[in-house]
Image: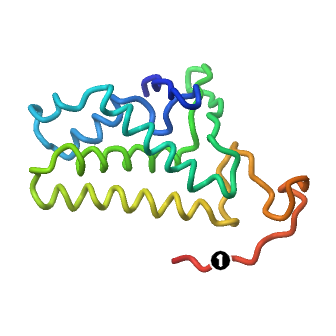
Amino acid sequence: MTTPETSPTTGEGFYSGSWVEVQNVLRVIDIGEGKMAKVTQTLVNSYQQRVDREIDAVLSELYQTPLRAMNQVQPNGALQRVFPGDVMQCALYWVAGLILLNEFQQLAQNITDQATQYVTDSQKKIYCMKHYTHRIPGQERKSHISRTLPPGMQPAFIPEQDF
């Protein structure tokens, strides 16, 4: 995993990691190396910024946003700052799907369908993280009762129906 670029809004890395990781997802879809030359760091970073703010907007009702990276111990003993895995995966595929849909309109129908599926699946997973029964590790929750009541002291919510 490469070091993510820094978001101009938060000063942290992007939720989806580096632009090279987004390129790797796009290479799996096989849109062609000639078209991959159009996927530059500036282009990917602009989509990463857009998706990160969308994720923050969805999760801001329940979590303190922007989300913070956590320290994770690597197999070699070094510490690396990473975002929770669910958020990283959703952001990565959301960015890749948006790039495919917006930058490459002349793709085959099955690739366009796959890109649309990337975006909708990622959005569904992010919206499921809004449920009060889901916890994102390492993130600070907001109280849904009072601004001064810590989230750990409030009563549990009635479970929501999962759509």
- In terms of secondary structure, where does tag 1 sit? loop
Q: Nearer the viewer, residue 74 or 96?
A: 96
In the rendered image, residue 60, in percent from the top left (x then y), is placed at 64, 52
Position of the N terminus by quadrant: top left
Q: Which residue is mark 1?
A: 160
The quarter of the picture where residue 32 lies is: top left
Q: Is residue 138 above or below residue 113?
A: above
Looking at the image, residue 3 lies above or below residue 98: above
Residue 88 percent location from the top left of the image: 49, 43
Q: Could you tell me which residue is drawn at 81 percent across and 70 percent down?
A: 156
Horizontal and vertical percent for residue 51? 44, 45
- Frontmost residue, 3 versus 105: 105
Left or right of 64, for residue 36: left
Q: Is residue 158 left or right of residue 112?
A: right
For the point 14% across and 43% down, which residue is it? 31
Residue at left 61%, top 54%?
59
Q: Name the residue rendered at 26%, 27% in the picture.
A: 40
